[in-house]
Image (tube, helix red, strand yellow):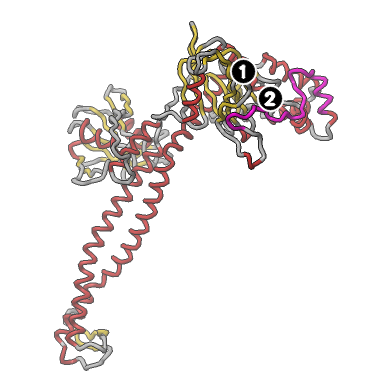
Amino acid sequence: MPFDGCFLKQTVRELEEAIDTHIDKIYQPSKDELVFLLRKKGFAKRLFICMKPGAARLHFTEEKLENPPAPPMFCMLVRKHLSGGKLLAVTQPGAERVAQLLFSAVNEMGDPVQIRLICEFIGNKTNLLLVGEDGRIIDALRRSDPETGDRFLLPGALYQPPEKQEKADPTTHTAAQLAALAAAENKDTAAALLDTVEGFSPLICREIAWKQETGVPLQEAIASILQDVNGAGAPTLLMKPNGIPADFTYTAITQYGSDVSLLRCDSYSALLDTFYAEREKADRIHRAAADMIKLVRTLRARTEKKLALRLQELEKCKDRETLRIYGELLKANLYAVKSGAKTVTVPNFYEEMKPITIPLDPTLSPQKNAALYFKEYKKTYTAEQTLTALTAQDREELAYLETVADSIARCESLTDVAEIREELAQAGYLKQAPNKRKKEAPTHLKEFVSSEGYRIAVGKNNRQNDLLTTVLAGKNDLWFHTKNIPGSHVVVFCGGNPVSDETLLFAAHLAAAHSKAAGSSNVPVDYTPVKFVKKPAGAKPGMVIYTTNKTLFVTPNGGSAL
């Protein structure tokens, strides 16, 4: 993504609006993010700094990011030095990917000091540094390792800016000068501009080269970009035909033709919020749930392996009746068995006296051979009963883990992740912190309203499914669930009143869309009054049985059939 030096210049220019604001609060939602709540008369905005490689940026945000229960150490350090401070300036040296925020604050002795927060947006070496008035580093988000030979970025060290590239600064050079530098390179236009001009991303270099190919003189193409760099540009999203943002920039992009459309945003901050919102949210949720995803995957693999082995053992028990028959026949024909014989052929009175050959242990007497067959029969009978129960438990376990995996995949917030974590802890799959007395957060179901005005609720995880079906729903309300597919419980609160086909299909669509089959077509959805839905004693969270149901077939994104 082209968060290059020239794009950073646009956001720095936008952030000047916050000069003379005071820091009200400081948060660190994740290890790579920092949020400042800035206020002054008639102004209150959140300043968002992200140092995640590939998504590093600096802008105002309207997103309300969820914060960890305890602030990280770096956040506490920044609070110590900057809480209550005042933003004096936001600067950027040339077109470098470095922004400096200058704050006035008060030190431990009560003396006024000036502290810089330096944001370095340099490839995979992004960093955030707190630098004191004496130019020494107070601390860095990512401290350096002296053994690697990189820059010395440790507390107490004198701050040294990143090594400057030998490139032309577009804020001090004219279009003619930049065109001459590019022409002097023995390369194609895009590569030459990338090597000679500071702050130009590959996208901008390709755009200039494209304009040149279409007949625009190189100097004129560069001049139009410089105009936009210096304030004439506009925050622009590049949209794919499916409506998903593909890229962002500060100038009109023509190189893709009709493959992308351009969407103007109200501000660069709004542009970055729009571009990163869903991706960042998904990444943040995935990181928070990573250990649970790994745990569920491991448990599923282990349970599947146990089930396969038990089914193999159960298969062997199918011949147990043969063992009993052998024992009965030997007992009835002891006189016909010769001592030391390896087999004996006797009439089988279970099959019209047809002869049957029975294997023998030559070291045992006829009586002991018969007793051995009875013993093996009893052993396989007990094993069959035990294995049948165990395989049923394994199947139930797999079904439950499938529902947990589906719930994790559909998490929409860190609160959803926390609820599933609590569910797994209560079920004994995760360890709970000792003596942890935490008030349980209220559960928020997803709710909709049908065209008839009926309230429809959707459980987002197994605990919510149990709450919805066994506590909140009335016995005459309608219950929906995908047939033999992990998913949410859906309840139409109709109280037994007639429900139109439109409402039935709407609820069925919700059940399919909130299930593992959300991307499939012709999904079967069962529905029945809640009074026919039962939770067996000892069943795992979210697991129920139901009867007297009807089935609808729907496609989550469209079609349906009664």
Q: Secondary structure at mark 2?
A: loop
Q: Residues within 10 Å of mark 1 (few under 14, many from 20)?
A: many
Q: Quadrant of the C terminus?
A: top left
Please give the range of residues in magenta.
153-182
In this view, 264 is above or below 479? above
Which residue has dot 2 on it? Answer: 96
Quadrant in the picture for residue 250? top right
Considering depth in this image, is 425 or 317 the residue closer to the camera?
425
- Main SS of residues in magenta: loop
Query: What kind of residue is marked 1?
Result: Val
Q: Is residue 494 above or below residue 292?
A: above
Disc tally is: 2
Q: Please tell me which of labels 2 and 1 falls first in the chain.
A: 1
Quarter occupied by the N terminus: top right
- The CA distance from mark 2 to mark 1 is 12 Å
Q: Residue furthest left?
A: 332
The residue beneath circle 1 is: 12
